[in-house]
Image: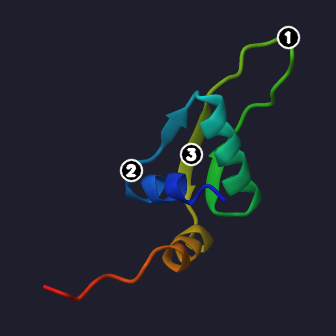
Amino acid sequence: MPMSLLAALARAPLPCTFDDLDDIEKIRVLLAHGHVEAIIPAWTFDSIQQPATVYAVTAYGVKALGHALPPPSNAL
């Protein structure tokens, strides 16, 4: 699961577009698991990949992110 990208999206101003193929595949995984709301244009062999756009991190994505991150440290 691309949790580092999900964490970055949770902090980023949305919508956010991605044109890197690795990022698009990570977004595809996050979308399939219900962690983000995004548009990923269909890919074909004879066309240039269009960017993916993430519109929101879902409540389920925030919940999953909370479980993936260590609890905040209270040591000051």
- In depth, the one of 6 and 55 nearer the eye is 6
Badge 2: residue crowd in 10 Å (few <14, some 14–19, many ≥20): few
- Whole-percent x and y of residue 63? 55, 77
Q: As drawn, which residue projects farthest toward the right?
A: 45
Q: Disc 1 on helix, strand or loop?
A: loop
- Whole-percent x and y of residue 46? 85, 11
Q: Amino acid at mark 2?
A: Ala
Measure how far apart labels 1 and 2 are at the Cα level.
32 Å
- In depth, the one of 55 and 70 nearer the eye is 70
x 54%, y 48%: residue:
55
Residue that mark 2 sits on: 12
- Whole-percent x and y of residue 26? 66, 46
The quarter of the image holding the N terminus is bottom right
Q: Amino acid at mark 3?
A: Val
Badge 1: residue crowd in 10 Å (few <14, some 14–19, many ≥20): few
x 62%, y 73%: residue:
60
Measure how far apart labels 2 and 3 are at the Cα level.
10 Å
Residue that mark 3 sits on: 54
x 19%, y 87%: residue:
75
Label 1 vs 2, first from the N-terminus: 2
Q: Disc 2 on helix, strand or loop?
A: loop
Measure how far apart labels 3 and 1 are at the Cα level.
24 Å
Residue that mark 1 sits on: 46
x 79%, y 13%: residue:
47
